[in-house]
Image (cartoon, rainbow, N blue to C red):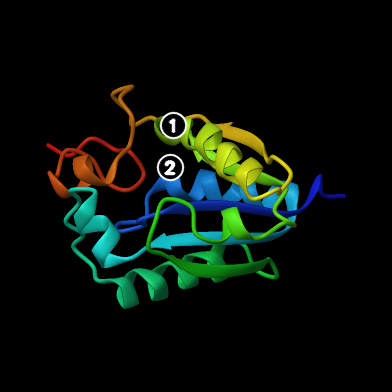
């Protein structure tokens, strides 16, 4: 029995790593359906990120990862051109799944939802996945060849 009918989460998902898998696992484990906001190339650039993969490639990779790791799950991948995308507009969204790094977004989202006469969402913070050295797994660390996608240290 799932706790929610619809939850939302988001990210750039440039190089999908264990932290992303945990975020997705959390969403799929508590909800019948998950809206996954995938950052557009334009928004990534605005935020100072330089993805290795363009939006279509990130979309395909994300879809492949979901099908492999979470078969039979109901989801929608939605392009994010701003911080919130459909989570603001969808009255039915009941929860927002965030990482510790993005936890402040929950307060911002609920403020916007209140302004739009939508009920607030429950904000669920997923702890950051840690690499073998005890430091968080991040796409930047993977790009810098410090760790792999599972958090193993690369020499």
Q: Quadrant of the C terminus?
A: top left
**Relative to residue 25, is residue 131 drawn left or right?**
left
Q: Residue at x 69, y 40 (%)?
A: 120
Which numbered circle lies on residue 68?
A: none
Give the mark, 2 or 1, whose residue is nearer the N terminus: 2
Residue 89 percent coordinates (x, y) = 61, 59
- Residue 46 shown left or right of residue 31 in the figure: left
Label 2 crowd (10 A; few <14 / some 14-19 / many >=20)? many
Write the residue at 68% across / 41% down. 121
Q: Residue furthest top?
A: 134
Q: CA distance from mark 2 to mark 1?
A: 6 Å
Residue position marked by numbered label 1 in the rendering: 128
Residue at mark 2: 19
The residue under the point 16% across, 49% down is 143
Q: Do tag 2 and tag 1 residues touch (Cβ < 8 Å)?
A: yes
> Does residue 18 lie above or below 46 as drawn?
above
| Residue 102, x across and y down, in percent | 43, 35
Crowding near the residue tagged with mark 1, few <14, some 14–19, many ≥20 C-alpha atoms within 10 Å: some
Q: Is residue 120 above or below residue 38?
A: above
């Amino acid at each position: 029995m799932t706790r929610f009918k619809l939850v939302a989460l988001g990210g750039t998902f440039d190089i999908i790593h264990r932290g992303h898998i945990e975020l997705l696992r959390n969403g799929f484990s508590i909800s019948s359906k998950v809206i996954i906001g995938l950052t557009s190339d334009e928004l990534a650039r605005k935020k100072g990120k330089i993805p290795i993969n363009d939006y279509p490639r990130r979309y395909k990779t994300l879809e492949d990862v979901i099908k492999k790791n979470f078969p039979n799950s109901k989801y929608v991948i939605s392009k994010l051109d701003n911080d919130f995308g459909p989570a603001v507009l969808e009255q039915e969204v009941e929860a927002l799944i965030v990482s510790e790094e993005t936890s402040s977004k929950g307060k911002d989202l609920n403020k916007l939802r209140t302004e739009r006469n939508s009920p607030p969402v429950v904000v669920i913070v997923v702890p950051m996945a840690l690499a073998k050295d005890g430091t968080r797994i991040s796409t930047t660390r993977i790009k810098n060849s410090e760790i792999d996608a599972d958090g193993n240290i690369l020499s």
